[in-house]
Image: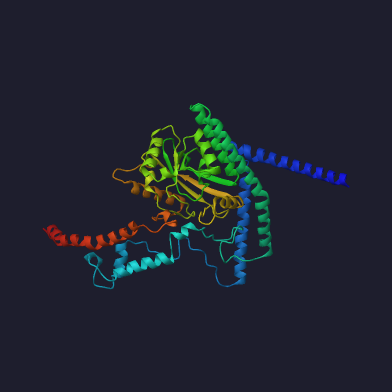
Amino acid sequence: MTDLCEGGMDDLWSIAVVLLQVWFSVMIGFIMIPAMFGLSLGVTSVYIQILVKILEWATLRIERGHRERSTLPVPAPLPFGLIQREGGSMEQEMGELRRYRTQSISRGEFALSDSFYFYIKGLESIVDDQVTQRFSSEELVSWNLLTRTNHNFHYISLRLTVIWGLGVIIRYCVLFPLRITLAIIGLTWLVIGTTLVGFLPNKRLKNWLSELVHLMCYRICARGLSATIQYHNKENKPQKGGICVANHTSPIDIVILANDGCYAMVGQSHGGLMGVIQRSMVRSCPHVWFERSEMRDRNAVTSRLRAHVAAKTNLPILIFPEGTCINNTSVMMFKKGSFEIGGTIYPVAIKYDPRFGDAFWNSAKYNMVNYLLRMMTSWAIVVNVWYLPPMTRREGEDAAQFANRVKSAIAHQGGLLDMAWDGSLKRAKVKEEFKEQQQKMYSSMVMGKKGRNSQEPHTESTRRQ
C-alpha cells in the first residue's frame, strides 16, 4: 500500500512538472520573446474582439431584461455631472439676473441680485462637485462583467450569470497566474539587466543597451496586463533633450508610454522593493530621483531638471504635471513647475477604454498591491495614446498660461473634460487664491467699469466731432 501511495505521488509530481514545463514553454515562446522584440502573434487582438462581442451581447441582454421587468426607462449616467451649465462668464450670468430690473450690468454698480450668482454657484458646487467625482471610478453605461458599477444592474438571466462565472474562472485561474508570472519576470529582468549594463563604460554601447533593456522589460510587463495600445501620430514622438508631459490616470501610464520609447523618469526616491528597482535603473540611465527633502525644495528640483534638459543627448523627461491620478474622464490643472524649466514640451494624451477594466488608481481606497491585483484580474488594458505636436513657450506667456495651453490641447485630443481645478484638492482644502480670484473678478467688473463709463460721453462727443 505504501509503495502504491509513493508511486501515485511520483506520478502526480511528474504530471505537475510536465504541465509546468509546457506552461513556461508556451509563455516564453508565444508571449515573452515576441514581446521583447515588439512583435505580436495576434492572439491579444483576437481575444479583444471576442470580448467586444461578449460585452455587446451582455449589454443587449441587460437592456432587454430591463424592458421586460419595467416600463420605466433606465437612466443613463450623465457624462459631465448632474447640472447642465450654460458656460457663460460671470458678467453674462449676472446680466441675466438683472434683466428684470432697469439697472444694467454695464453701469458698473452693485446690485443685491448679484449675490444670487454666488449662491447659485455655491449650491451647484455642493450638488454637483466637479472635483470629488474625478477621484472615483467613472460610471459605465453598461455592466462590463467585472463589477456591478451601477445600482441598476441586477440578476437578469441564467445565461448572463453563467458567462460571468466563466469569466471569473478565466480571469483568476488562467489570466492572473500568467500575468503575475510575466510581471515578476519583467521586473526581475529589469533589475538584473540595468545593473549589468551599469558596469559598462559610459559610452554609446551602454546607452544603446540600456534603452534595449528598458524597452524589453516594459513590453513584457505590458503583456502581463494584456495591454492593447494604439499609438497615433508617431511623427510627434518626444525627442531627446525634451520634456514629455501627459495626463495621469494610473501608475501603469509609465509602462504604456515606455512601450514605444525610452524616457528618463522623475520621482521621489523610495525604499524597499521600489528602491531596489530605482537604484538599478539609475545605474544605466540618467533617471532623476529626488530625496524627500529635495522634493520640498522647488529651486533644487528645477535646477536638476534644467540641467538634464540642457544635455541634448539625454532621454526626454517624462512628467505628469497633474501630480495625482484622475479618473480617465478629465484633465485637471497642470503644475507650472514643469513649464518653467525651458525647452520643448511634447504633449501626450492617454485615454483608456473603461469597458475592459478600470485603469484609474484610487490611492485613497486601494494600496499599490491591491490596485495591481485588480488590474491583473481585469479583462484587459485597452488604451489610445496620441502624440501631439511639440509646443514651446510664446513670447509674453508665463508658465501658468503655457501649462493651461498644453493642458487644453491634451484634453481636446483625448476627448477629456478640461478642468481648471487643482488635483491636490483630493487631499487639501481650497486655496484662498481661488476665493480671491472670484472676488477680484467681481470687483473689477463693478469698480473697473465706472472709470470706463465716465469716459464714454467724452469719447462719443469726440467721435461725433
Residue 348's x, y, as percent? 45, 45
Question: What residue do we see at 68% from left, 54% from top?
Answer: 169
Q: Is residue 145 left or right of residue 131?
A: right
Q: Is residue 120 left or right of residue 46?
A: left
Question: What residue do we see at 37% from left, 61% from top?
Answer: 87
Q: Is residue 266 left or right of residue 221?
A: left
- In the picture shown, does residue 116 fall above or below 261? below
Residue nearest the observer in this picture, 180 or 84: 180
Residue 33's x, y, as percent? 63, 37
Colouring of the image? rainbow
Q: Residue furthest right?
A: 1
> Quarter of the image holding residue 62?
bottom right
From this viewpoint, is residue 222 visible? yes
> In what quadrant of the picture does the C terminus appear?
bottom left
- In the picture shown, does residue 454 fall above or below 285? below
Residue nearest the observer in this picture, 235 or 19: 19
- In the picture shown, does residue 292 fall above or below 112? above
Q: Is residue 408 left or right of residue 210?
A: left
Residue 337's x, y, as percent? 37, 45
Residue 245's x, y, as percent? 43, 44
